[in-house]
Amino acid sequence: MDRPTDLPRRRFLHLAGTAAGLAATSACASAARANGPGASTPGGPLTVDRTYNPTRFDPWIELDRAAWAHNVREAARLAGGRPILAVVKNNAYGLGDRAVGPLLAGMSQVGGLAAVRVEEALAMREEGVTKPIVVMAEGSEDEIEEMVRHDVLPSVWLDDAPGRLRSVSRRLGRPVPVHLFIDTGMNREGMPYTRAGNWIEELVQSEHVDVNGTYTMFTHDLDFDREQHARFEELLGWARDRDLPLGTLHAAPSFELFHLPEAHYDMVRPGNALFGNAPGEEAREMADLKPVFSLKTRVVRVEHLEPGDSAGFNRTFMPDRATWVALLPIGRTDGYPSAANGTCEVLINGRVYPVAGGVNSAHTILDIGPDKTVEVGDVATLIGPDHPAVLPHTVGERTELGFLRIIQSMNPRLPRRVV
Ligand SMILES: *Cc1c(COP(=O)(O)O)cnc(C)c1O
């Protein structure tokens, strides 16, 4: 039997008003396979592989242990050797608390971890973190009880904290260790310093409470930071005069780690700096912070286009020359921003290629150029330290999203791989 011959390529040079994008919706039909609930599972029970698997094309996040260690050393140097209470809130700013927590906790300069949700703290305990974990949020009685059971330190700042802690302490049959969060003018979280006195006295003297630490948070307005520092100092002096021990004192997130050394207290409390994000131009001069992660995937298709061909929804990419395009199975859902199309580049085999055919929900199309320099299975780095074009800060600038929004958008489901 004859092999079917290739079809001749039909030309379609008309540019405006095509509905080419709609054709892609037919792909949905094939996705709607009979895998619904109740379907038997031939091949054994369904498992979701959360770990890195080199046979898959799908994206993953790589965490560079040496870069984290470097940033931790830089932070410790700025803090004059004080221990670091490493902030890994918000799922480690998007990079993944289950991976980042144990990684940081394994470093000698890190005295403990700080989260904002009970789940984050418990997830890190589940991952084997044994160092102190502070949750920088108020909790319900049930949450506080659960934290104490897992050796996690809750924060308190509400007026009714003494009553709630008494009740939890009675349930547990032991005092509840807590950190007191004092508001010195940010007016976000904390017990306002102006009426903290009696509240502190009641907590410190309560047999149901063990005040393990006391802290405040700064606004990053340096003049006002100094005023906040003075307010905190006044309160600390007041407590000292009355012999009210306040435990470990901490106050400085990244900005004040760099700019307000008088507020370093017993330990410093940075997040961003450890993640490679220096708080401002001046800070970049004061410390050499390294990018700590990469966002990678594997090329899943390489095709040749001729003039007149196009790629992507609404024919996003319409080259006027013959070129190759590569498909990456990564998109907005994974955290790679749609604003990367036409602005960002992707690193493959040491060369960067422009994002040209759109960043869709789960797909990104690159323009490879006239030579086929990329093969299916090649590793593509969308964000990472190995080329200036893919640095987290570069992607943040080119997409106008900034460093934080880039990392905070990483899909929690992406496998994390520590290298
Ligand atoms: C987020 C946060 C930090 C860490 O701030 P960075 O700017 O990331 O260093 C420290 N303390 C509190 C209370 C925070 O909310």
Image (tube, rainbow, N blue to C red):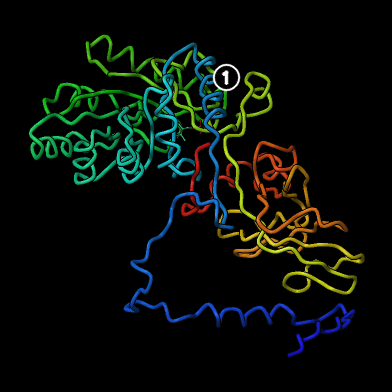
Give the percent coordinates (x, y) of residue 259. 57, 19
Q: Nearer the viewer, residue 272 or 346?
A: 346
Any part of residue 15 in sight: yes
199 to the left or right of 317: left
Tell me the quarter of the image containing the N terminus: bottom right
Compared with 217, 310 (above or below) is below
Give the residue drawn at x 57%, y 20%: 258
Give the residue drawn at x 48%, y 13%: 262
| Ligand 1 has an atom within 8 Å of the beta carbon of the residue at disc 1 | no
Circle 1: element type:
helix
Q: Amino acid at mark 1?
A: His
367 to the left or right of 98: right
Give the percent coordinates (x, y) of residue 384. 65, 40
Q: Nearer the viewer, residue 346 or 264?
A: 346
Q: Nearer the viewer, residue 83 or 319?
A: 319
Extreme front residue here?
1
Extreme top residue here?
241
Give the labeled residue for mark 1. Answer: 259
Extreme bottom residue here?
1
Which image quadrant for residue 176?
Answer: top left
Compared with 64, 398 (above or below) is below
Give the percent coordinates (x, y) of residue 303. 77, 66
Give the residue drawn at x 35%, y 19%: 249
Any part of residue 409 in sight: no
132 to the left or right of 48: left
Task: Report the number of discs.
Answer: 1
Q: Nearer the viewer, residue 264 or 185?
A: 264
125 to the left or right of 149: right
Instruction: Give neighbour class at mark 1: few <14, some 14-19, many 20+ (Cα, 10 Å).
Output: some
Give the percent coordinates (x, y) of residue 403. 62, 41
